[in-house]
Amino acid sequence: MARPRSRSNKDLPVNLYRGEGKTWRYRHPVTGKYHGMGDDKAKAVIAARKLNELLIPSADLVARVLGELTFEEFTKEYLANKRRKDGRPLAANSIRGYQNYAKRCSRWNELPISSITLFMTNELLDSLPASTSIGCRSFLSELFDVAISKGLIVDNPARQTLKRYRTKQRKRHTIEGLTAVRAASPKWLQNAIDLAMLTTQRRIDIINMKWTDIYDGYLHVAQEKTTDDPEDEFEFLEGAGYIRIKVDAELQKVLDRCKDNILSPFIVHRAARNWGRPMKNKKEHWTQIDKQYLSLQFSVAVKKSNAYPHLVGRQVPSFHEVRALSIFMHKKAGKSAQQLAGHTTEKMTEVYASGHEISWNDVDIGITLPFADVT
């Protein structure tokens, strides 16, 4: 409970305080920050009352009587019932991402969901870095949409905010640059680069490819996840693409190079040095490539090759940018990169309910590898 005001301040509205000398200051009820209000008491009082009407949730007491959910309670319920667009449970990484966004909004935890205003939402999003703000806005937009569908609120304050845009720093790969990086890479990483170039698939889908995924003349790729990465124009919010990539002569060459004396269920694999020890992380097989390890080793190869001496920090292209170069090359060759990447529109792959079959999109590779050394 707030401390009672002194007798001399009884006539002041909530959150208005005396400053230094004869000045007045207003305490923001959400952020707790103080703002100067000048030395005219009458004007300060009027301004404070207007600000209180805008900033103080007026429905708190009524909401408690009616048993309205707080923002924290509703968020927990929302995440507990959140599913992918195909109806399957969220991946662990997706859950962690949503939980991180929820933590960003923890200042609202004790407030009724209906008391979150447009001003409060703007203030929160503006306080975050651009990339985090974009993700948090998407999270809140979906959350408030569900709240509207349940009759808890009538407006979606997140969707009324202006979407921020991140200044892109990371540059694209060039064929010359990627060729140099590939030459400085170990064999297994060369295989991963080649597969990414031919198939346009993401890092996680490349390292998850298995030999058993190849049958009937096709490489079957059940894409694990898509994101809303603003740097990837072929991404959408959620879901899974199911595509069958025809194994042509070019892809078969790469697959043949992936075969070695290491018995592994994964097409891209390596012999770990500690293969005889218990695995610390949860790998399906001791030869499986960890996604973070792939990114790290790709970064090492970039530095070793000195492929991009004029780029620094976040400007240096990552393994993910191999996908961007591949998509560019497919489009340049007049091929449909969108379907190969698993992002159809009207023909979006549907995953039916239990007892139905998965519908696969059949696609062909439209390019050959641009690297001079493909042995």
Image (tube, helix red, strand yellow):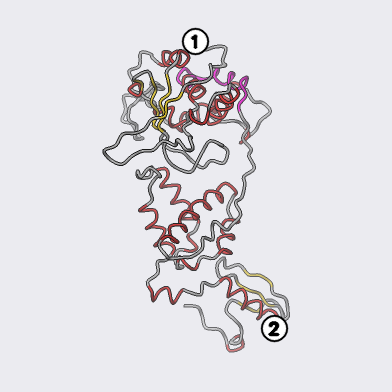
Secondary structure mostly taken by the magenta-highlighted segment of the chain: helix
Q: Residue at x 46, y 51 (%)?
A: 100
The amino acid marked with disc number 2 is: Ala
Is 255 drawn above or below residue 163 in the view shown?
A: above
Residue wearing tag 1: 375
| Place of residue 346 in the rendered image (x, y in percent of width and height, measured from the top left) | 47, 38
Above-or-below relation of 114 to 339: below
**Residue 141, percent from left and from top:** 50, 55
Callouts 2 and 1 close, C-beta under 8 Å: no
| Residue type at numbered disc 1 | Thr
Horizontal side, residue 60 vs residue 357: left or right: right
Label 2 to label 1, Cα distance in Å? 83 Å
| Residue indicated by mark 2 | 42
Query: Which residue is pictured at 59% across the width and 19% down the height?
Result: 180
Front residue of this view, candidates 180 and 122: 122
Q: Residue 21 sits in which quadrant?
A: bottom right
Dot 1 crowding, Cα within 10 Å, few <14, some 14–19, many 20+: few
Within 10 Å of disc 2 (Cα), the crowding (few <14, some 14-19, many 20+) is: few
Report the span colored magenta.
Answer: 173-190
State the SS at label 1: loop
Is 76 positioned to the left or the right of 313 in the image?
left
Outermost residue toward the front?
Answer: 346
**Magenta region includes residue 122:** no
- In primary-sequence order, the first of circles 2 and 1 is 2
Depth check: give the residue in front, 317 or 230: 230
> In the image, residue 229 lies at what x, y percent?
53, 40
The answer to whether residue 230 is left or right of residue 96 is right
Residue at the left extreme of this rendering: 355
